[in-house]
Amino acid sequence: MNAQAPDAPPPPQSGTAFRSVPRTGVIYVMTEAAKYGYTPGSTDWANLGQGQPEAGALPGAPSRVEQVAVRTDDMEYAPVSGLWELREAVAGHYNRLYRRGMPSQYSAENVCISSGGRVALTRAAAALGEINLGHFLPDYTAYEELLSVFRLFSSIPILLDPYRGYDFSLRELEREIAGRGLSALLLSNPCNPTGKVIFGDELKGWVSVARRLDCTLLIDEFYSHYVWNDAAFGSPESPPMVSAAQWVEDVDVDPVILFDGLTKNWRYPGWRVAWTLGPKHIINAIASAGSFLDGGGSRPLQRAAVALLDDEAVLAETRALRQVFRRKRDMTLRRLAALGLHVDREPEGTFYVWADVRDLPPPLNTGMGLFRRLLEEKVICVPGEFFDVNPGRRRAQRGSRFASHVRISFGPDEAQVMTGLDRIAKVIAEAARQG
């Protein structure tokens, strides 16, 4: 046995050419959960952390695709921009739902297909120039490393106020763009994690400001079918989803880039099929970035995705998920309020509740404290500090603004959500008894 002496120096580390790459918030919490025995598919865990919707059958929804045919030509690479027929289907999907009667219509050349949302966003970030790019706090955890890797642009944080329900007026938008010299603005709508939705005249105003000030909006619309505020749809005839595509005047001029895919809105996260929609010249730049970043996506899955963009199938799926997920949303809000968690703004979209735990008994009164304790009960959530996006850790660290927040997902099936909430209640009751 070659046991090393206790006082021997540690062996030299290899690979010093590589930097330490942090895990995104969700990946971090899943890695920590694995240390407590969690594995994908664990039936004894309540995973209220991962950003994944239940992927099984829903009442009234189209049948789930469980087999994908693979043709001989599917053995070849797919084009970096994606299969032409899928690009056409995506363009037609937006034209039919959001742009009926409008003179400017999207075409296949306005669409780029990629292997998931992170790849779509990474391609776009790689194609940005030497600009100031604004982003909001709080927002999607993966933006942090995305905005750190590419050094051409400078990321500028914009803090949203919990006491105002994370509202941000058009006047404030103009002031930030003009005052900070922003050439682009990255945001999720509906917002992950707060659930705030920009819609109707407000969203029209955002697009108008971007057009007038030539500030590109990079809008992550991956939760655009999970909208709980019925006022967002304008009329009973409106499609039950929200997109800035409705307010674009000229698809090849207006600086509006949209990201979406099958992951959330179609409930096929494992397919890793996403798309970027925007002016042709920007889509060409994004595709060029994809040629060296990832090389393109899966041919068979792109081909199978075409049928999923059929209008009737999309609307049936969206109505079904709205019915099921709205029920889970309302249940989660009731239970959390009864347990003493405060919600700054009830989620108008997404399948998350952004809750403030500061009034819970210690050590549950911080997002990290609650997260650590819940792991012992086989429940996963995401501490709020991960949504305090700080690219490159350039901002001074004085404690996270969202240290007392936690994101709780009602994405899993209802039984799993109920189990998780029951265990949260148990943990809070035990802490209260212990004083």
Image (tube, helix red, strand yellow):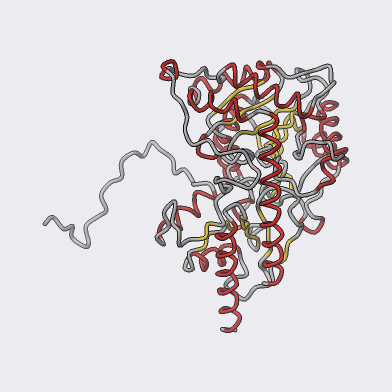
Q: Position of residue 402 (x, y in %)?
A: 66, 58
Judged from this view, the residue extending furthest toward the left is 1
- Dividing the picture into quadrants, the one containing residue 427 is bottom right
**Number of labelled discs?**
0
The residue located at (88%, 38%) in the rendering is: 201
**Percent coordinates x, y for residue 129 in the rendering:** 65, 24
429 horizontally vs 163: left or right = left
Image spot of residue 44 (x, y percent): 45, 62
Rendered-image quadrant of the N terminus? bottom left
Q: Residue 20 at x, y = what percent?
A: 44, 44
Residue found at x 58% / y 69% = 424
- Res. 269 image quadrant: top right
For this rendering, which residue is in front, 235 or 216? 235
Asked if 403 appears above or below 428 in the picture, the reply is above
Depth check: give the residue in front, 200 or 193: 200
Does 206 sit above or below residue 58?
Answer: above
Q: Nearer the viewer, residue 9 or 24?
A: 24
Q: Quarter of the image for the C terminus: give it.
A: bottom right
Residue drawn 61% across the image and 47% down it:
58
Instruction: Tell whether 370 sits left or right of 232.
Output: left
Residue sitting nearer the eye, 420 or 150: 420
